[in-house]
Amino acid sequence: MPEINSVKFNADGLVPAIAQDAENGEVLMMAWMNRESLELTLSTRIMHYWSRSRNALWKKGATSGHEQSVVELRYDCDGDTILAKVHQKGAACHTGERSCFFNILLEAD
Amino acid sequence: MPEINSVKFNADGLVPAIAQDAENGEVLMMAWMNRESLELTLSTRIMHYWSRSRNALWKKGATSGHEQSVVELRYDCDGDTILAKVHQKGAACHTGERSCFFNILLEAD
């Protein structure tokens, strides 16, 4: 995995990861990965994050069954953000919503 | 703008903001907003960020002309990430690429 060295983790050892539905392009959630969760995501093709609230490795769907299998992983121009296109089982959000972004701050014209 | 109080800024006073192409769903970039840039984004419907490298308010496209006009703004379930659907003029990325996410870490099967 040579490219993983192009990813820049922040002072806390974390990088933000955006999960996007591979089928319809919907942005599902944003969470954080440390190096271990990124390595596990690459090796298993199942999304692993770092839970900042629990301070623990977090295999998405481990308890809910709402796994995200990875279709493609990208990183941005300066290497400090990950974009994952995923197949989402069930809901991405712990509230039961498909996407975490269900709150509208400014509506479409 | 009552809903802005639902947005949680981090210890540095910043919140990550994902910009997504309103036309085709492509994720264009991720950058940071402070409260002022979010307020300006809401009032002008043009994306404003906070540049962590320049430590300054950053009206996207102010020098390049590559403005992002806001179609819709959302925030996530725990209020700590913004999702903006935008009309992107020209390239979102400073490299000239349409999206900042042009580096592939793991290819589609």
Image (cartoon, coloured by chain):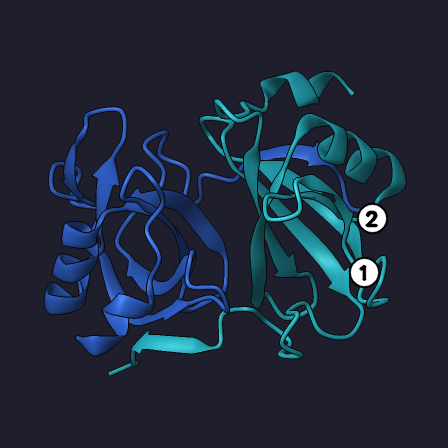
Chain colours: A cyan, B blue
Q: Are marks 1 and 2 in contact (CB under 8 Å)?
A: yes
Above/below status of B74 relative to B12: below
Q: Secondary structure at mark 1?
A: loop
Q: Quadrant location of residue B70? A: bottom left
Q: Could you tell me which chain the residue with mark 2 belongs to?
A: A
**In the rendered image, which quarter contains the N terminus of chain A?**
top right
- Distance from Cα at disc 1 to Cα at disc 2: 9 Å
Label 2 SS:
loop
Camera-near label (1 vs 2) is 1
- Asked if A95 appears above or below A85 in the picture, the reply is below
Q: Position of residue B82 (x, y in %)?
A: 38, 59
Q: Nearer the viewer, residue B22 or B51?
A: B51
Q: Return the disc, 1 or 2, that comes first in the chain's sequence.
A: 2
Q: Residues within 10 Å of mark 1 (few under 14, many from 20)?
A: some
Q: Which of the two residues, A98 or B21, is positioned nearer the viewer here?
A: A98
The quadrant of the image that shows the C terminus of chain A is: bottom left
User: Which residue is tagged 1?
Assistant: A61
Q: Is residue B90 left or right of residue B36?
A: right
* Relative to B26, residue A75 above or below: above
Question: Which residue occupies 57% across, 31% down?
Answer: A14
For label 2, count other residues whose C-alpha is less than 10 Å away and answer few (under 14), some (14-19) or many (20+): many
- Give the residue at x 12% y 58%: B40
Disc 1 chain ID? A
**Which disc is residue B6 wearing?**
none
Please name the amino acid that badge 2 sits on: Ile
* Residue at x 44% of width, y 44% of height: B99
Residue B15 lies, in percent from the top left, at: 35, 49
Identify the disc placed on residue A46.
Answer: 2
On screen, B68 above or below A12?
A: below
Residue A75 pos. (x, y %): 57, 34
Q: Looking at the picture, how far across and down is residue A50, in whole percent? A: 67, 41
